[in-house]
Image (spheres, rainbow, N blue to C red):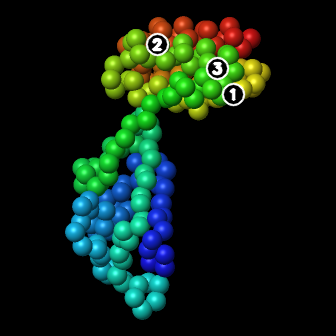
Amino acid sequence: RATPERPYLLHIDEINRADLAKVLGEAIYLFEPKADAARSITLEHQFLGADGQVVEMPENLHVLGTMNSADRSVAILDLAIRRRFAFVSLWPQKTVVNELACDLMKDAFDRLLNIFVDHASGEAMSLMPGHSYFLEQDTDRAKLALQTELQPLLTEYLAQGYVAGFAGEIAGYLQWIDAQTS
């Protein structure tokens, strides 16, 4: 309220890890899209002084919730929450890897991306590791990252059956990592 002309951003990382309907309760109303008037709710209990019962969503507050859609251990957002947010899918960016990574990581990214593009179903495509796995610039550190970050992730995908439709290709990729890092 102090600076209504200035935009504010509230970033909630891993927004899907909590049961938002329970966390937000009646406050979910504050996130209603396209409200014509200021949105407010009255809380059952008072806090923050005399006017602490009324909570408003200022027009200059923007909420950005991020989530990893490949994380199978968390529930999908319920529809009441989902309809109050816009959703944008962000896919691994080859241009970022090409600009920032060493040759080994560029090759590792291209090989794995090709496996996913050629063999993954739509649902399995969301399991493609993001470009942050492939940004090492130093070859020795890249080898270590492949062994300690990417290889365990892909091994877990195999163990859980997430990539059953192209398990042979992923197993071959893991062998390629072994050859590059030994």
Given residues 130 and 168, the one toward you in this image is 130
Separation of residues labelled 2 and 3 (CA atoms): 15 Å
Task: Work out how far the residue at label 1 is from the one at label 2, CA to CA, in angstroms.
Answer: 21 Å
Instruction: Residue 105: give its label.
Output: 3
Quarter containing the C terminus:
top right
Looking at the rendered structure, the secondary structure element under dot 2 is: helix
- Quarter of the picture containing the N terminus is bottom left
Image position, residue 104 (x, y; %): 67, 16
10 Å neighbourhood of mark 2: few (<14), some, or many (≥20)? some
Image location of residue 45, percent across then percent down = 36, 83
In the rendered view, tell whether residue 171 sits above or below residue 16: above
Residue 136 in the image: state x and y as whole percent: 69, 28
Above-or-below relation of 170 to 97:
above
| Kind of residue at badge 1 | Glu
- The residue positioned 41% from the left and 84% from the top of the image is 52
Mark 2 and mark 3 lie on one chain; the one further toward the N terminus is 3
User: Is the residue under label 2 in contact with that under label 1 (CB below 8 Å)?
Assistant: no
Q: Secondary structure at mark 3?
A: helix
Q: Quadrant of residue 120?
A: top left
Of 123 and 93, the residue lying toward us: 93
